[in-house]
Amino acid sequence: MFVRCEVCVLVFLYVQSVASRVDREPECSRFHYDEKLLEKMVRMEFNVERLQQRLDSVSESVGKLDGM
């Protein structure tokens, strides 16, 4: 009887610990956040440079058409 009660208590505590982990939001370190932010900024800088090249190319093409 005593062993069964111990097992029930252990199962209850395990379920409680799992349930408390599920309810919490995922933890995120400051380093992880900064790394992800830097990664997004680098991608954005690359995209802006690519768009600038395309804009320069289109401006050059328009300039050639205006000269005709």
Image: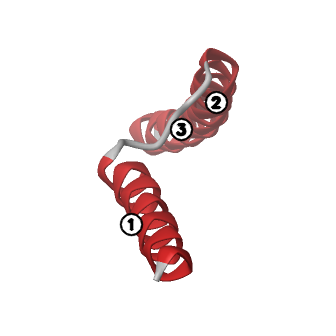
Name the residue carrying label 3: 51
Determine the secondary structure under disc 3. Answer: helix
- Give the camera-side residue of 66 and 17: 17
Determine the secondary structure under disc 1. Answer: helix
Q: Which residue lies at the image location 51% right of the left edge and 69% below the top edge?
A: 6
Check disc 2: other Cα within 10 Å, few if <14, some if 14-19, many if 20+. Answer: few
Query: Residue 43: x percent and y percent?
Result: 63, 37
Name the residue carrying label 2: 49
Q: Which residue lies at the image location 50% right of the left edge and 43% below the top edge?
A: 58
Q: CA distance from mark 3 to mark 1?
A: 58 Å
Check disc 1: other Cα within 10 Å, few if <14, some if 14-19, many if 20+. Answer: few
Residue situated furthest left in the rendering: 23
Proximity of marks 2 and 3: CB atoms separated by less than 8 Å:
yes
Looking at marks 3 and 1 on the same chain, the residue that comes earlier in the sequence is marked by 1
Query: Residue 55: x percent and y percent?
Result: 50, 36
Name the residue carrying label 1: 12
Looking at marks 2 and 1 on the same chain, the residue that comes earlier in the sequence is marked by 1
Q: CA distance from mark 2 to mark 3?
A: 5 Å
Quarter occupied by residue 39: top right
Which numbered disc, 2 or 1, marks the residue closer to the eye? 1
Which numbered disc, 3 or 1, marks the residue closer to the eye? 1
Query: Residue 7: x percent and y percent?
Result: 52, 76
